[in-house]
Amino acid sequence: MNEKYRRILMTVFGVLIAGFSVGMFNFSAFGMDPFQVFAHGIWSHMPIGYGVFYSILNLIMLIFIFIIDRHKIGLGTVINIFLLGYVVQFSSWLFETWIPNPTIGLKIVFLIIGIVIMCFGSSLYFTGDLGVSTYDAVALILSERKVARFQYCRIASDFICAIVGFSLGATLGAGTIFTAFFMGPIIAMFNKKIAIPLRYGKQKVEYIDKGVSPKI
């Protein structure tokens, strides 16, 4: 399989399993990632399904991203807008139906597995490099406009989303804090061990070991 098709599969599979992991976050009840906290906070005051609301929210953000930097828009963006919300809604329903009364230990297991799966999916999705989600584009654009380094722009956007979502009634917990501190290193590990070799081959990993970073 050539690189083009590998990138497409990595993007589709990565975004979808990342969305599935959000359902595991919801089930654990230990909090979600910051943007999902933001989205769920607003959605809790809306008379529509989460899938529909999530698509509308992303379409609104997409308009602004298109005006500011249309190069950030691609296949990954489309999947995030039109499919991710429904995947989250389905996976949340699935776990709540299968396990209506989970123990605290099981919730912790779901939280840990959910974080690992989210990092794995994010690694595939970013390394596929076929467009980013509207939320990911925010920090990227701010950093490219020299507002601050990417990590600081992301921390700021995560902080704002978490506070706004929490103030509107969404769950803010250990899972939210854990993702803020540990997602980066875990994604980097998956990049090196799985995603980059999958897209480029083992030779690219050797470049990373020598200090040369690929575009992801």
Image: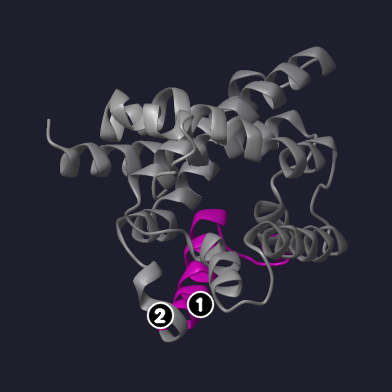
Locate residue 37, reporting x and y percent: 72, 54
**Which amino acid type corresponds to the residue marked 2 in the rendered image?**
Phe
Mark closer to the chain start, 1 or 2: 1
Tag nearer the camera, 1 or 2: 2
Any magenta on residue 127?
Answer: no
Give whichever of 18, 196 is nearer the camera.
196
Give the residue type that dot 1 points to.
Answer: Ile
Q: Residues within 10 Å of mark 2 (few under 14, many from 20)?
A: few
Determine if residue 4 is in view.
yes
Q: Is residue 213 above or below residue 101?
A: below
**Residue in view at x 67 percent, y 77 percent:** 147
Residue identifier under label 1: 60
* Residue depicted at 78% across the width and 61% down the height: 165
Q: Magenta segment, principal secondary structure?
A: helix
- Determine which residue is flagged by label 2: 66
Q: Find numbered disc 2 in the image and state the secondary structure of the residue it sits on.
A: helix
Q: Is residue 101 visible?
A: no
